[in-house]
Image: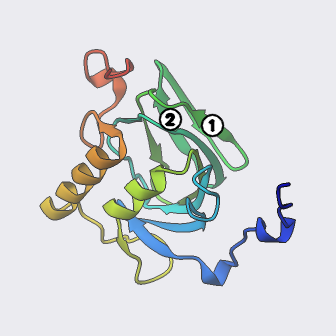
Amino acid sequence: MTDKINPKDRLRYTRAEEREAVWFLGGRVEFMLTDEMTDGRIMLYHHVAIPGAQPPLHEHEGEDEIMIITKGRMTFWAADQVVTLGPGDCIVLPKDLPHTFRSEEGMETEYFVLTSPAAFEGFVREASEPATHPGADLEFTMTPEREQRLHAAAKKHGVTLMAPPGTLPTDIPGGTEPVR
């Protein structure tokens, strides 16, 4: 006979004031649901991006990524498509699909990121540094130390960085094709 699982033992939540915050490429990330909380199934964080922020063109080997914009606008480049989304809009970026995105210039953009499975959390944590104040780090610059940490975390966690920040898929041959 198997023991029944008490539903109260499975309930997970975080209060806003209890969230861990880090700066990931200058944006403020607050973890809401973590790998540990969901047994590795999903990860959810809230992100406040620097105006005009754009991560390197990249692809995820193991997780699908869902982004929901709550403030500002973001332009996404993936699979020979370009789409600009605003508050309330959502996009799914499947694993193995090279993509990048840029937040709107002139204002902070806010969005939620959900990944499944939750392994992307390890990459974000290892490429980040503790946040010291609310909002994005408007003084952020990519230093050699930060770039080295980003590349090491990407290699360890199955994120392929295909080109430096600012590069669009159309800027490189085969830019929208999976690396593998």
Q: Say which element carries label 2.
A: strand
Q: In the drawing, does residue 88 fall left or right of residue 144?
A: right
The reply to whether dot 2 and dot 1 touch (C-beta < 8 Å) is yes
Amino acid type of the residue that numbered disc 1 sits on in the rendered structure: Ile
Q: Residues within 10 Å of mark 1 (few under 14, many from 20)?
A: some
Q: Is residue 84 above or below residue 67?
A: above
Q: Which residue is mark 1?
A: 91
State the quadrant of the C terminus.
Answer: top left
The dot on residue 124 is none
Q: Which residue is mark 2?
A: 76
Q: In the drawing, does residue 63 fall left or right of residue 89?
A: left
Camera-nearest label, 2 or 1: 1
Report the number of discs: 2
Q: Quadrant of residue 124?
A: bottom left
Q: Say which element carries label 1.
A: strand
Residue 149 position in % (x across, y down):
22, 59
Q: Is residue 108 visible?
A: no
State the quadrant of the N terminus.
Answer: bottom right
Compare residues 4 and 82 and report the one nearer the observer: 4
Residue 76 position in % (x across, y down):
50, 35
Q: Is residue 75 above or below residue 153?
A: above
Amino acid type of the residue that numbered disc 2 sits on in the rendered structure: Phe
Q: Residue at x 24, y 41 (%)?
A: 164
Q: CA distance from mark 2 to mark 1?
A: 9 Å
Q: Is residue 11 visible?
A: yes
Q: Residues within 10 Å of mark 2 (few under 14, many from 20)?
A: some
Compare residues 38 and 85 and report the one nearer the observer: 38
Residue 137 position in % (x across, y down):
38, 71
Q: Residue at x 40, y 83 (%)?
A: 132
Q: Which one is earlier in the sequence, the residue at label 2 or at label 1? A: 2
Residue 128 position in % (x across, y down):
35, 65
